[in-house]
Image: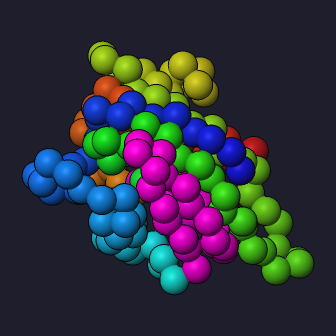
Amino acid sequence: MGLISFFKNAGEKVFGKKEEVKEQEKADAIVQHIKRYGIPTEKLGVSVDDEKVTITGTVESVMEKNKIIVIAGNVAGIGEVDDQIVVDVPEPVVVEPEKQFYTVKSGDYLSKISKQVYGDAMKYNVIFEANKPMLKHPDKIYPGQVLIIPPLEG
C-alpha cells in the first residue's frame, strides 16, 4: 500500500475531449477502463482528486492488485495512484511476493529492461506476460508507461 507516481501526460486517454471533467466522471471512466481488462471492480472504490487516484477495496491476488494500479496510473492526466487495496487471500494460499514497478524511458524496449533487471535480455517475456492484457505486443511500450516487474521463479 502506498503512493505510486506516474507520468501525468503519458498513457491512455480515457476522459474524452471535454475541457472540464469532474472528479466523479474521471473515477467512473477509470472504473470502466479497469473493467475493459477483465478485472472485477465490484469490491473496489475509485476516487479522483485532481491528478491523484485513490483505489480502495479488496482483490484476490497481488498480481491483480498490481494490474489495477498500473491500469489506473497509465491514464493520461493521472500522476499518482494511492494504493489502499487489500489482498484478501484465504489461509492456506501462499501470497506472491510484492512486484516491482518500472517506468519506461525513451529508448527502452522489453529485452533491454529485462537485461537491466534480470541480467538476461531473453527474459523479456516474463515482463510481457506479467503486464498482459495491458500490453498487446512486446514492442508496444511507450515512455512514461509503468510496468510490473515480477520476480523470477526459482
Residue at the right extreme? Answer: 91
Vertical placement of residue 24 versus 89, above or below: above
Question: Residue at horizontal 59%, vertical 49%?
Answer: 82
Q: Quadrant of the C terminus?
A: top right
Nearer to the camera, 22 or 64: 22
- Residue 149 appears in which quarter of the rendering? top right
**40 is within the stretch colored magenta:** no
Residue 80 coordinates in the image, percent (x, y): 50, 40
Residue 131 appears in the figure: no
Residue 60 coordinates in the image, percent (x, y): 66, 74
Residue 135 coordinates in the image, percent (x, y): 33, 50
Q: Is residue 4 left or right of residue 70?
A: right
- How many circles with numbers are drawn on the protein? 0
Q: Is residue 6 left or right of residue 61?
A: left
Residue at the left extreme? Answer: 17
Question: Residue at horizontal 30%, vertical 66%?
Answer: 25
How is colour applied across the structure in the image? rainbow
Question: Residue at horizontal 66%, vertical 73%?
Answer: 58
Residue 87 coordinates in the image, percent (x, y): 72, 67
Q: Is residue 110 left or right of residue 114?
A: left
Vertical placement of residue 113 versus 10, above or below: above
Residue 98 appears in the figure: yes
Vertical placement of residue 65 versus 17, above or below: below
Residues shaded magenta? 43-71
Q: Is residue 118 left or right of residue 93?
A: left
Question: Residue at horizontal 24%, vertical 39%?
Answer: 140
